[in-house]
Image (cartoon, grey):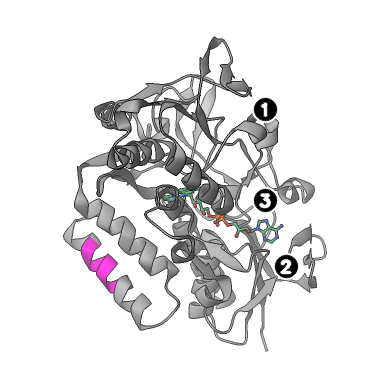
Amino acid sequence: MNTKTIIVLGAGVGGLVVANELRRKLPSQHKIMLIERNADHRFAPSFLWLMTGNRKPDAISQPVHRLVRSGIDLILGEVTEIDLTHQQVTTSQGAFGFDYLIIALGAELAPEIVPGLAENAHSFYTFAETQKLYQTLHRFEAGSLALVVCSVPYKCPGAPHEAAMLISDFFRRRGIRDKVEIHLYTPEPQPMPVAGPQLGEAVKQMLSSKGIHFHPLHKLASVSRSEIAFEGKDSARYDLLIAIPPHRAPSIARQVGLANEAGWIPVDRFTLRTKHENVYAIGDITAISIPGRWKPDVPMMLPKAGVFAHVQAEVVAERITDEISGRTPTAQFCGTGYCMLEAGEGLAGFAFGDFFGEPSPRLELRNIGRAWHLGKVMFEQWWLSPFGIKKALLHSALNVGGKLLKIPVDV
Ligand SMILES: Cc1cc2nc3c(=O)[nH]c(=O)nc-3n(C[C@H](O)[C@H](O)[C@H](O)COP(=O)(O)OP(=O)(O)OC[C@H]3O[C@@H](n4cnc5c(N)ncnc54)[C@H](O)[C@@H]3O)c2cc1C
């Protein structure tokens, strides 16, 4: 009998979707293994609401096994080695052979790269640190708050702007907004450069309407107890520092010989295939160049975002299913994506478009409104529900909502 083993590394956004879709599509004779080191899944987009006390930690967590379809072998362990020649993955729970491999190990945070950062900065990029940050924001009474993007690439290009606006709203609700200055520093030339100048201008206006000072082209060099130093710019004083730490690819990508110079895994942008046959990579660990230039000598890269990991996972599941079933795979990732930008006060902005558009990504903007915020909340509820009636109902509601609003929300 023709039986195949497909191993998925990482049960984050991309890994969960690809494993569940493969299980839905493939007959049970084929084995699907999902390997993940954390027993609990935390929904990262909700870290922003955890930071401002709009969510409790339990409300944005779910044991991984509850998010996985039955018929998937979930291995809770650390992936330590990938051997492409012998088609084998080694983990803390043993070694497993594969016919197909999908690498969805995400990006790592590396605060230690910037001197003084780890000791002095808060962050909302991990579950544990976000809970600490909430306590700190709760106690903060007055002064200068610096929110710093350390380097590119980083996950979710909208997140720093959303965080600044949500913090502004949090202080307004606490009645201390006029006692706090909020500064957002980034090495980028504008907010979300990949989305083009029109969207960048709209985000700048959203920030300025909330009294947030935006400082582009500020590359963080080092941090001391009360001061941040930038390359070639004046230093700034702070009372509370929140950073989006430098990101790097998991070292395993480099060890296995699939990575580019920066450590990320280049893939065919339509099929997500790596240079190795039967090995795919999806989500934040990939490097996918897109049309357009960030600076004259720096090509644009597809942003690291869950919406892309999700669609890429569906494409890979369909391609592998077709291949195993003897059909010619036709599914392709076409670079469409969207972003709901939380603006505080129960409102959000919305942008969507074609990131593979020529000569540069083509994005459309919709007016800020309550519907986008509610859409984000519904997506969160759908994502965190275990398989069953609730998930099916939310699924239908999201798809109907997307059609009514004429937006490509397909979950
Ligand atoms: C604060 C914040 C807000 C965000 N908001 C949004 C948003 O609104 N919209 C959006 O589209 N995206 C958003 N994102 C980005 C989104 O969360 C990521 O892009 C997405 O999770 C990437 O999916 P992935 O599968 O590539 O990686 P991940 O979801 O990070 O999954 C990787 C998995 O691999 C596991 N893993 C890693 N190494 C090993 C190992 N050696 N052994 C075993 N397991 C391992 C990890 O534990 C993890 O579960 C946000 C991110 C943050 C931090």
Residue 27 within the magenta-colored segment of the rendering: no
Quadrant for residue 169, please give it: top left
Element class at badge 3 = loop
Q: Mark 3 or mark 1: name the one nearer the start of the chain.
A: 1
Which residue, given by chain and number where applicable, does mark 2 sit on?
77
- Is the N terminus in the top left, top right, bottom left or bottom right quadrant? bottom right
Numbered label attached to residue 48: none
Which image quadrant is residue 168 in? top left
Picture coordinates of residue 39 (x, y %)? 63, 69
Q: CA distance from mark 2 to mark 1?
A: 32 Å
Label 2 C-beta lies within 8 Å of the nearest ligand 1 atom? yes
Magenta stretch: give its range: 395-401
State the CA–CA distance, disc 3 to disc 1: 38 Å
Of labels 2 and 1, earlier in sequence is 2
Looking at the rendered structure, the secondary structure element under dot 1 is loop
Q: Name the residue located 39 percent from the left edge and 42 percent from the top edge.
A: 355
**Between 9 and 287, which is closer to the camera in this rendering?**
9
* Residue 245: quarter of image: top right
Quadrant containing the C terminus is: bottom left
Ligand 1 visible in quadrant:
bottom right
Q: Amino acid at mark 2?
A: Gly
In screen coordinates, is 252 left or right of 232? right
Q: Nearer the viewer, mark 3 or mark 2?
A: 2
Q: x, y percentage for residue 382? A: 37, 68
Give whichever of 125, 296 is nearer the camera: 125
Which residue is tagged 1? Answer: 116
Q: For the residue marked with disc 1, what is the amino acid?
A: Gly
Q: Residue, x 58% and y 67% (percent of image)?
A: 40
